[in-house]
Structure formats: C-alpha cells, structure tokens
C-alpha cells in the first residue's frame, strides 16, 4: 500500500483502510504501543504490535529513535487520546537506534540542553512545531508579496558595500591563506582580495533592492544577512534572514501601512495553517509562565497575543513624542531607567522600547522621525534639519522587529550627507545613479525574520527559532 504522512492519516475521516507509514519511534510502551512520528505533525500515530505475531529479532529492534516502516490497517482506537490507531500487519526496521546513547529523552529536556544537541533537536515536539511554523511564515512572506505584484529580487551575498555603514561585516577572502601576500610590514595584504576588491558578506540587500525598485516599482528580498556584531543576546544572530521590500512612489505613511498589513498577513497565515503547532507552543509557553513569579507573568496566552496584534492598529508616534513619554514615566519601583532619557537625540535602549510597547501602549508601536545622527545615511532628511523619515516597529517581548525609512531621493542632499559621514561617494556611484537618472520618492523596510518567528512561536531565545544558529559562540556545523 501507498506510504502516507501521519498528518494525513490523522486528518482522514475514514477508518478500516490499509496504509504504509514511515517514521521514527518516539516511545514504545508495554511492548505493544509505538508512538510513531514522521515530522509532518506533533501528533504521533499509535502503532499497535503483537509480540507473539512478530519475528523476535525484529521486535527487539523497536527502540526509541529507530526508523521504521509499518504497513497495516487504520482502525478506530479504543484507547484514550487518539481516534484511530494502526494495527500492524508488517513492520520493518529501517535504521536501528541505541536508545541508551540517544540524547533525546521522552521526558522534557531543557532548551539549553537542546542547543547543545542542535543537530538532533528537530526530533522534538517543540522544535517540530517551531520549524514547521517558520516554514509557513516564509511561505506566507512570498505569497503576500507575490499577490501584490512585487518582484522577488535576489541581491548579492558577497558585496563590496556596507549598506548600514556600521562596519559590522564579515570579510570574504580569496587569498591563499597558507601563503598570503604580505606588505612591507609583514601584514597580510588584502588588496589582492576577490579579484582586486575588498569584499564582505552582506549586512542588507537594501541598496541593491533600491536599484530594483527604481525599475520594477515594487521588489522584495528575502535572504541571509550577516552582522559581525559581538552581541551575545537572545535577540541577535551573526547570520539571520531578512525580508526587505522596497517600493517606488511610497512615502513614509505608505511604508508603515504596508509593513503593518504585511506583519498581520503572515501572522494570520500561521494561525490559519499551523493551528496545532501554535496551540502546542501556547501550552509550552503557559507551562513556562507558571514557573515565573505572579507579577512577571503575561496576562495573555500565545494565541490571544497573536489575535490581539491582528485586531488592533499599531500605535504610531514620533521619536520626539516617545522621548516626552519616557521622560515623564516611572518605569519601576525605583522610578528610573538604567539609562536615563535626559537628552533629545540619544538612541533608545531596549528597556525604553520595552516600556513604550509593554507598559505604556501595550501594543506594537511604530516610531518615526528619529534624529538623523543615530540613523543611516540613506534616510530622507526632514525639513527641520534634525530628523529623518525613519520608522522602527517595536513589538512586545521582542523590541525592534522592523527598521525602515523613506529614502533620500535628492542626489545633492544624499551626497552632502555621505560626505559628512565620510562614506566614499565614488564606490557607491551605482547607488547614486538611481538619484541621477529618474530619481523618485521611494521607501522600504527590513524585517528580521527570526524576530518574527520568535514572536509568533512564543519562544524566547533567537537561537531556538533558526535551524542552525550562528552566534559569536556557536557555529559547529
Ligand atoms: O534595522 P536594520 O539594521 O535595518 C536594515 O538593515 C535596513 N537596511 C532595512 C531596510 O530598510 N531595508 O535591520 C532590520 C531588522 C531589524 O529591525 C531586526 O529585526 C533585524 O533586521 N536584525 C537582526 N535580527 C537578528 N540578529 C541581528 N543581529 C539583527 N540585526 C538586525
Ligand atoms: Mg534597526
């Protein structure tokens, strides 16, 4: 009979038909009940075997973690907890597993431990739910933009430019490092790098995205980005995925509207398509919350939190208004922030962002019109001569999830700003050409995909929502 996925078997209304299923043994109870999982859902299929009817050598090899193929009849289950079960007619061991040595245990294991066995953690319910949800969100990203007529533009991974001007780049080298060319001082001479250019892994596809927007109108990128910032936090990765739409003829307000619609769309998609996984993750989160002192517990469950975001408009305020709110706030018992907000112009710390989102507005907030000095060179300058048309979207429990802006479309203003900041104008001639040849108002933003997955899954550490985390401390495989 044909092999089917367990998800399909469990969704099928029928009983008394024959199937073949293949998967891994999660548990083997009473020498009779196998909980079989094939990764298509967290719900295991109960496979019933009769020892007396089986080849003893095969029977002995049914262990936790083993890969098996089973053919038999799907019948109504008399046991509690499942509607149907599989009555085994034939069972084949595809791959043995020494259950003693197998690091995945049936009882709950900590996420920290799972990070140490990240190569095997996909085989657990938590990571199964997280990565199926991640997949759906990625699919929804493409569906959203495709439906709106955006072109998916593949921007380079290896690049000579630093789009954010923050200098946090991984260098790419083509030099023979066993015998590298050296200058007179004996230092490695990187001038010979990559066909005579010094190159890096991209920190953002935005600048190339702008080239596309000035031809196609609307484009988006969705690819890996790299930041050599040494931040060992639960929100930062050295390699993360970013979605960067860029739209011609959009002003800041249009940009905000699109970002809000986009985020709501993908969250709704996950709620509609990954209900089981999200309900599992909601329960996981609720159990975790119970460990916390009452005062620190969230008053909303995961599903409620996602629905709340869908059903409420994001708050939109300027940086200047945010500073006013923060100056007049008493964030805690000590009535003080660790980093005081006295001067206009200071960058917001995560405690300030959290206060605005979690305590003051209690919903996602879009902050706009930041001081030029703390934002990137390409942002459109406001009339006031101090601020730029930036927008950051802040999310409860996450902080910054989106960074974006309207772009400076005036060639002269952009060049003047680049000169002020010491950004080499000649090297970015290709970028400046968009402003020389038919420049137009345009805007875009970048959404950190893992931060979105964190929010939707209710996980708390960014290492737990990317299959192979790359942080300053981990890059084994
Ligand atoms: O705010 P950022 O640096 O903005 C840009 O790169 C712009 N070029 C985007 C644009 O306008 N097209 O990064 C955008 C988002 C952040 O809001 C955050 O969600 C995520 O990328 N991000 C990170 N995610 C994980 N680990 C890191 N180290 C991240 N750095 C930024
Ligand atoms: Mg940012």
Image (cartoon, rainbow, N blue to C red):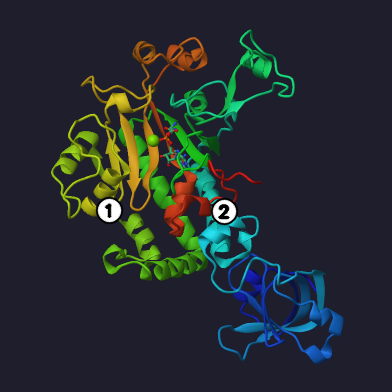
Q: Taking the image as four quarters, which one is ligand 2 found in?
A: top left
Lower sequence index among marks 1 and 2 = 2
Mark 2 close to ligand 1, CB under 8 Å: no
- The disc at residue 135 is 2
The image position of residue 414, as x and y in percent, is 37, 15
Q: Quadrant of residue 222?
A: top right
Is residue 51 toward the left or the right of residue 276 in the image?
A: right
In the foreground, 329 or 138: 329
Residue on which the image places disc 1: 358
- The secondary element bearing badge 1 is classed as helix
Q: What is the spatial separation of the Cα atoms under label 1 and label 2, in whole angstroms?
A: 28 Å
Is residue 78 toward the left or the right of residue 258 in the image?
A: right
Above or below, comparing residue 404 to residue 382 in the picture:
below
Residue at the farthest front position? 185
User: Mark 2 packing: few (<14 Cα in 10 Å), some, or many (20+)?
Assistant: few
The image position of residue 416, as x and y in percent, is 35, 11
Residue 93 seen: yes
The image position of residue 262, as x and y in percent, is 42, 46
User: Mark 1 packing: few (<14 Cα in 10 Å), some, or many (20+)?
Assistant: some
Above or below, comparing residue 63 to residue 102 in the picture:
below
Q: Quadrant of residue 83?
A: bottom right
In the foreground, 373 or 430: 373
Residue 132 seen: no
Q: Residue at x 47, y 25 (%)?
A: 167
- The secondary element bearing badge 2 is classed as helix
């Amino acid at each position: 009979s044909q092999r089917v996925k367990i998800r399909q078997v469990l969704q099928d209304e029928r009983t008394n038909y024959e199937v073949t299923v293949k998967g891994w043994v999660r548990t083997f109870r009473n020498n009779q009940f196998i909980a079989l999982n094939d990764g298509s859902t967290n719900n295991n299929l109960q496979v019933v075997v009769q020892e007396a009817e089986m080849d003893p050598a095969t029977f002995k090899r049914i262990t936790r973690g083993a890969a098996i193929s089973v053919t038999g009849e799907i019948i109504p289950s008399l046991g509690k907890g499942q509607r149907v079960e599989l009555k085994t007619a034939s069972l084949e061991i595809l791959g043995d597993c020494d259950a003693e040595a197998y690091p995945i245990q049936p009882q709950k294991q900590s996420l920290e431990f799972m990070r140490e066995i990240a190569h095997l953690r996909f085989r657990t319910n938590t990571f199964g739910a997280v990565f199926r949800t991640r997949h759906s969100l990625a699919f929804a990203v493409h569906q959203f933009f495709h439906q709106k007529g955006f072109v998916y533009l593949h921007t380079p991974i290896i690049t000579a430019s630093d789009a954010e001007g923050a200098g946090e780049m991984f260098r790419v080298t083509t030099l023979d490092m066993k015998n590298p060319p050296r200058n007179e001082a004996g230092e490695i001479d990187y001038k010979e790098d990559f066909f005579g250019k010094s190159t890096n892994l991209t920190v953002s596809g935005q600048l190339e995205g702008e080239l596309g927007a000035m031809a196609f109108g609307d484009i988006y990128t969705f690819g890996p980005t790299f930041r050599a910032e040494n931040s060992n936090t639960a929100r930062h990765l050295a390699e993360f995925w970013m979605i960067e739409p860029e739209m011609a003829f959009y002003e800041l307000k249009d940009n905000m509207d699109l970002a809000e619609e986009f985020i709501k769309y993908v969250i709704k998609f996950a709620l509609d398509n990954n209900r089981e996984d999200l309900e599992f993750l909601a329960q996981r989160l609720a159990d975790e919350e119970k460990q916390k002192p009452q005062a620190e517990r969230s008053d909303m469950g995961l599903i409620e939190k996602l629905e709340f975001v869908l059903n409420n408009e994001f708050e939109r305020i300027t940086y200047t208004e945010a500073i006013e709110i923060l100056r007049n706030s008493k964030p805690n018992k000590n009535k003080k922030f660790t980093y005081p907000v006295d001067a206009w112009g200071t960058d917001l710390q995560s405690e300030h962002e959290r206060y605005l989102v979690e305590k003051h507005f209690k919903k996602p907030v879009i902050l706009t019109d930041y001081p030029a000095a703390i934002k990137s060179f390409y942002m459109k300058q406001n009339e006031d001569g101090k601020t730029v048309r930036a927008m950051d979207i802040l999310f409860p429990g996450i902080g910054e999830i989106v960074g974006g802006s309207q772009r400076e479309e005036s060639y002269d203003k952009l060049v003047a700003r680049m000169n002020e900041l010491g950004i080499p104008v000649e090297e970015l001639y290709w970028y400046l050409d968009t402003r020389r040849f038919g420049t137009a108002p345009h805007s875009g933003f970048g959404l950190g995909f893992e931060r979105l997955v964190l929010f939707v899954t209710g996980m708390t550490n960014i290492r737990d929502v990317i299959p192979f985390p790359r942080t300053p401390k981990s890059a084994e495989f």
